[in-house]
Image: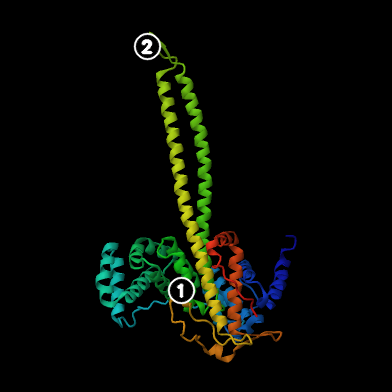
Amino acid sequence: MALPGAFPAVVAGAVRALFDRIADLDMECRTRLILWFSHHLANFQFTWPWEEWAYVIDLPKWAPKRVFVQEVLEREVRLSYWEKIKQSIENAVGLDELLPLKGGSNFKYRAEDGQESSPQHALSKDLNSMVKGKVTVHEIVLWVEEKVVAVHGFKCALEVVIQTLLDIGSKSFTHLITVMERYGNVIAKMCPDQEKQVMLIDEVSSYWKDNTQMTAIAIDRMMGYRLVSNLAIVYWVFSPSSMQQFHTSDRPWEILRNAISKTYNRISDLRKEIYSLKRSVLAAKESLVEAEAELEAAESKLSIVNSEPVRGENPGRLKRLKAFADKRKEEEVSTRESVEAKEALLARALEENKALFIAMYKSFANVLKEGLSHADVDGKQDNVPSRNADAMAVDPDEPLTMEVDEENERSKKIESQNGDTIEEAAQWRRSTLAYVKAFTRQYASEVLPSFKDPRSTNIMPQFPKDS
């Protein structure tokens, strides 16, 4: 660039213009802007006149401008460290409230004054000692079944095991991976079905309640180790606690994006492997044809004289040619079998992918219909949906409520710079619909084939236009 010094100033003007219109920005564009802007600031010493945007702290927590600033700061912490970002916003009074809490872990069984306050604290301490003592996985599984589940129940056992293992692995990403690799079978034994996996994900989210990055990493790795399924992740995202965050945080959406991307990448990798193997089959076939032709030519030089074969070729060479041809034939057969195995895996992955998208769109349809059913004739809505009745099996007659904190008590509407107003429920609906559009656009090549099956014609929901 001829004038590198002018670049930040030009970008600053563009960012300010986009920020002023952030409520009307496409959700996928908003997400990309957050990711890009945080990286841009990382390249310029995290310097930005945050005092210009300090007023967002007085807006309700669902205000698009406030959410944008909150997400940028959270991403900056990932790219640097908490103290550095705290220092970068020191001129913006009150804006530090939007920073994620330092550390972010929420260990339920942390000892206070050196004493355990409940039996669960003692169980957690025992498990910690077993891990440090390198007790075998089999012994830990037996201990969990006999000493914890049998006495205190499954829910308590899950809390103790997951909280303790996550706390042991909380020092770094490497520690977390090591714990999952060594003790993943303990978790798999406890959570073999989808319902329990949803509870597992909820416990992970509870431990990392103030650290979105570690929540996303832990759940992503658990999916990679087949400890949780992508469907379990979908049902967790549309559970009551996560739905409360649809319009206030990117946390549930990041986790859902990761699950879809991981499923999609596996399909993409399998397709590449199959393509490569098919090319190898062709190469092996060509090599086999050449080897068989050379062997046939050598054998044709044999002649029979007085009932005795007279070799026109060196016997050793003939033997080598036959061995070479046999080897090429084995290679071709082996490669074809590999193609068939990979194609079977691909077919299974495509079915899983189809089930994933159907579950996701059904969940979107359920929560949006549920939310709209509580709107009055003027299009106003008092409550944000707090559950997924279909997926989570909650009583459909149960009244919808939403926790109201002091921040929401101060204002029920967003008052923007130009006087526009929007209610919380409308913002929740607008955000949720925007993510439907974003996911559909991003994965259109995988979504559309899943719904072309005539048996699936009633699955794809027709979403109402947002008012």
- Specify whether residue 324 is in view: yes
- Measuring 44% from the left and 37% from the top, which residue is drawn there? 331
**In the drawing, does residue 19 fall left or right of residue 456?**
right
According to the picture, the residue beneath numbered tag 1 turns out to be 391
According to the picture, the residue beneath numbered tag 2 turns out to be 308
Label 1 SS:
helix
Q: Where is residue 309 in the image (x, y as percent from the top left)?
A: 39, 13
Label 2 SS:
strand
Q: In which quarter of the image is residue 12?
A: bottom right
Instruction: Give whichever of 49, 423 is nearer the camera.
Output: 423
User: Where's the C terminus, which quadrant?
Assistant: bottom right
**In the drawing, does residue 64 fall left or right of residue 171?**
right
Q: How many labels does the image show?
A: 2
Residue type at mark 1 is: Ala
Q: Marks 1 and 2, Cα distance to the nearest angstrom?
A: 81 Å
- Specify whether residue 90 is in view: no
User: Where's the N terminus, which quadrant?
Assistant: bottom right
Mark 1 residue crowding within 10 angstroms, few (<14) / some (14–19) / many (20+): some
Q: Position of residue 275 (x, y in %)?
A: 53, 46
Q: Where is residue 314 in the image (x, y as percent from the top left)?
A: 42, 17
Mark 2 residue crowding within 10 angstroms, few (<14) / some (14–19) / many (20+): few
Please say which color scheme the image uses.
rainbow
Task: List the single residue furthest toward the front.
Answer: 454
Residue type at mark 2 is: Glu
